[in-house]
């Protein structure tokens, strides 16, 4: 890489254990007096505890966030926003909660403080995917980017091992694609390699012992780096396939990323020899197979069939991914894409096909 453009996203990152105690100071720092705390229904108790800890700076709680940021839920939340005359948003949860906070910020221009409790990485990106009538539309806008992110390892200790594993591999996917993005740059590549290393070594430890604080700290640090990668450079085939599969067959987000990543990397491998060498330095000599094996070691599903995708969906997904493709380092060919999806559907190991074949 001899020429590049690097543009940093503005963000204030607070990382550690017990860092949630800094939330009142961060609210004051932004000059906020009436924030709305948002969460999913299962994390309503966390949201209430957070609301209690910030006292009169909290105007209310909306614990109605759901996966894929449906516009109908955002509309409901907007009536709460208007009724309470809030001046800021605090999100506590995973990518689904962050998605709602981002949707509200986009509509109101209000600042967000995000407290992530999974490894999905959305808090570091100016990207929002919203669902209307079953179709997910993704956009990028600087107004979507949170002002402050508070990473508190304590809040990740309760993340179930299965979700820890797949949300961690979702983060790895952000970093892998960042290494071969069209607008890749040396700064983001450094972050990507470190993020991948941290998550690949910590996820098996977390699954073996969900109370392993050192591994949890390593994973959250890696998730921050991987999220920053997704926020800074473009996506390619892997994210395109996951968005297509998720939208077409209502497949679970992190689990779909976990199944697809080894196959998408194998597809691109012949076109990105330098990236494969870099990945080999952290994953071993065969990075695509190493990612497939990682999914197996952490007990994640390794096939789209296991996630509920019908076999006749393979051709549909190949057509849809080709109809509106993202830029990709290797040209997209329908036959190879169909073969990739067939392997991902069946759960067979990834196969690197030479360009000449
Ligand atoms: P999620 O936010 O849907 O969380 C899954 C479940 O786990 C929820 O019920 C949640 O309440 C629960 N949970 C979260 N943290 C927990 C904890 N510490 N302890 C116990 N339970 C906990 O899952 P996710 O994988 O974080 O997010 C997926 C969503 O994020 C998708 O909609 C995806 O599109 C989006 N996403 C967006 C971006 C972006 O940049 N825009 C990036 C990554 C993911």
Image (cartoon, helix red, strand yellow):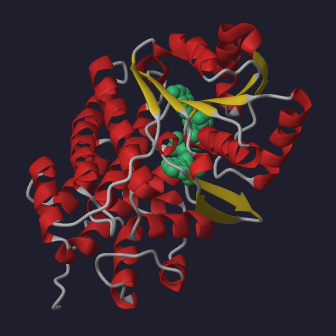
**Relative to 266, residue 145 above or below:** above
Quadrant containing ligand 1 reads top right
Q: Is residue 234 above or below residue 92?
A: below
Any part of residue 87 in sight: yes
At 33% across and 31% down in the image, what residue appears? 221
**Residue 319 location in percent, x, y?**
51, 85
The residue at 13%/70% (across/down) is 273
The answer to whether residue 264 is left or right of residue 121 is left
Q: What count of labels does the image hold?
A: 0
Question: Left or right: 178 with respect to 84?
Answer: left
Taking depth in this image into account, of 5 and 256 the one nearest to the observer is: 5
Q: In what quadrant of the picture does the N terminus appear? A: bottom left
Residues 35 and 171: in front is 35
Instruction: Residue at 49% x, 21% y: name it.
Output: 155
Quadrant of the rendered image containing residue 266: bottom left
Q: Tell me the quarter of the picture where residue 316 sits.
A: bottom right
Q: Position of residue 257 (x, y in %)?
A: 42, 56
Residue name at image x 32 percent, y 55 percent = 6
Left or right position of 180 against 277:
right
Q: Which residue ends up furthest to the right in the rendered image?
A: 83
Find residue 288 and report its horizontal and vertical position in percent. 22, 61
Q: Quadrant of the C terminus?
A: bottom left
Whether residue 348 is visible? no
């Amino acid at each position: 890489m001899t020429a590049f453009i690097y543009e940093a996203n503005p963000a204030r990152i607070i990382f550690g254990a017990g860092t949630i105690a800094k939330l009142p100071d961060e609210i004051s720092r932004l000059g906020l007096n009436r924030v709305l705390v948002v969460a999913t229904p299962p994390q309503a108790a966390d949201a209430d505890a957070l609301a209690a800890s910030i006292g009169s700076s909290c105007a209310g709680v909306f614990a109605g966030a759901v996966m894929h940021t449906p516009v109908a839920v955002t509309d409901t939340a907007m009536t709460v926003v208007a009724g309470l005359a809030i001046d800021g948003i605090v999100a506590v949860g995973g990518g689904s909660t962050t998605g709602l906070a981002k949707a509200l910020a986009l509509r109101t221009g209000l600042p967000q403080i995000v407290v992530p409790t999974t490894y999905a990485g959305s808090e570091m990106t100016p990207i929002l995917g919203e669902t209307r009538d079953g179709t997910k539309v993704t956009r990028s806008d600087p107004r979507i980017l949170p002002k402050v992110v508070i990473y508190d390892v304590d809040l990740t200790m309760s993340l179930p091992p299965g979700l820890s594993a797949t949300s961690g591999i979702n983060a790895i996917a952000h970093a892998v694609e960042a290494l071969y993005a069209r607008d890749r740059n040396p700064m983001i590549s450094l972050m990507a390699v470190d993020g991948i290393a941290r998550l690949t070594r910590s996820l098996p430890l977390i699954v073996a012992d969900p109370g392993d604080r050192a591994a949890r700290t390593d994973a959250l640090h890696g998730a921050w780096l991987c999220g920053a990668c997704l926020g800074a450079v473009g996506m390619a085939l892997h994210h395109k396939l996951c968005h297509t599969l998720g939208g077409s067959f209502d497949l679970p987000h992190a689990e779909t990323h976990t199944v697809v990543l080894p196959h998408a990397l194998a597809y691109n491998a012949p076109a990105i020899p330098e990236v494969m060498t870099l990945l080999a330095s952290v994953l071993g000599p065969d990075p695509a197979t190493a990612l497939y094996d990682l999914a197996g070691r952490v007990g994640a599903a390794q096939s789209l069939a296991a996630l509920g995708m019908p076999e006749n969906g393979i051709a549909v997904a190949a057509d849809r991914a080709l109809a509106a493709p993202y830029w990709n380092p290797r040209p997209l060919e329908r036959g190879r894409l169909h073969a990739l999806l067939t392997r991902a559907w069946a759960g067979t190991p990834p196969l690197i096909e030479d360009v000449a074949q």
